[in-house]
Image: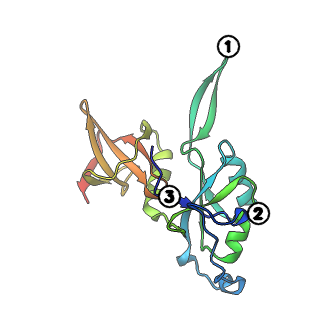
């Protein structure tokens, strides 16, 4: 999966290809004046297998976070066990105002590489993309990870537990699925929507 158009900020390691320093224009005084309406979701690029630990550290600092997870069966020579793992490896979502204080909290956490963005700017994630994933994980319809899609018929689910969730409609072998994408990190998931009503967006 290509992520060549992504970059991330990492002020602790200088400036290089795909890296940028956080803007010094945001002050602590300004951060205290930020209203809840200005809070946005962002993706943090992290070390592999450190996603849950990073999420706990950020929550301990009072930040709102989200790491979607799935259960996998891990097999060893003598046993097998269900293990909870991140759905999107290398990423933790955080909802913040990108104030100087928010950035300080993020960069104090070990194993965080930086905010995901393009051309040196942190890229906000639309609320509906995070809301859609949260709704899917909260119900029991079968779903799976899916290759990132940029084109296709966009639809909205009407009624039921996934009411209002938007994504790309897919039909394979008579099965109808909805592809939910997070553009900032170029990752997607697919959920079966047989029996749900959908409408074009």
Badge 3 crowding class, 10 Å Cα cut-off, few under 14, some 14 to 19, many 20 or more, is some
Q: Secondary structure at mark 1?
A: loop
The mark found on residue 108 in the picture is: 2
Q: Nearer the viewer, mark 2 or mark 3?
A: 3
* Depth order, front residue of 168/27: 27
The mark found on residue 6 in the picture is: 3
Above or below, comparing residue 120 to residue 23 in the picture: above
Residue at left 75%, top 55%?
110
Query: Measured from the top left, where is residue 183 in percent x and y?
Result: 43, 57
The quadrant where residue 164 appears: bottom left
Residue at left 36%, top 49%?
160
Badge 2 crowding class, 10 Å Cα cut-off, few under 14, some 14 to 19, many 20 or more, is few
Q: Secondary structure at mark 3?
A: loop
Q: Nearer the viewer, mark 1 or mark 2?
A: 2
Query: Measured from the top left, where is residue 195 in percent x and y?
Result: 29, 40
Left or right: where 140 falls relative to 14: left
The residue beneath circle 1 is 77
Q: Secondary structure at mark 2?
A: loop
Query: Measured from the top left, where is residue 3 in percent x and y?
Result: 47, 51
Q: How far is the residue under mark 2 from the one under mark 3?
A: 22 Å
Residue at left 64%, top 71%?
21
* Depth order, front residue of 37/13: 13
Above or below, comparing residue 90 to residue 63 in the picture: above
């Amino acid at each position: 999966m290509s992520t060549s158009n992504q970059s991330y900020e990492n002020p602790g390691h200088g400036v290089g290809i795909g890296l940028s320093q956080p803007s010094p224009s945001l002050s602590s005084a300004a951060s205290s004046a930020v209203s809840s309406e200005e809070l946005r979701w962002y993706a943090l690029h992290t070390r592999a297998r450190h996603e849950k630990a990073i999420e706990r550290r950020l929550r301990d600092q009072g930040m709102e976070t989200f790491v979607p997870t799935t259960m996998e069966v891990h097999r060893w020579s003598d046993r097998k066990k269900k293990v909870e793992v991140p759905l999107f490896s290398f990423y933790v979502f955080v909802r913040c105002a990108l104030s100087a204080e928010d950035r300080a909290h993020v960069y104090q956490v070990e194993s965080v590489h930086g905010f995901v963005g393009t051309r040196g700017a942190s890229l906000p994630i639309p609320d509906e993309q995070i809301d859609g994933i949260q709704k899917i994980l909260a119900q029991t319809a079968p779903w799976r990870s899916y290759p990132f899609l940029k084109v296709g018929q966009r639809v909205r689910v009407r009624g039921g537990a996934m009411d209002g969730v938007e994504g790309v409609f897919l039909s394979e072998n008579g099965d109808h699925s909805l592809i939910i994408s997070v553009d900032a990190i170029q990752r997607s998931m697919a959920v079966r929507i047989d029996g749900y009503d959908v409408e074009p967006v």
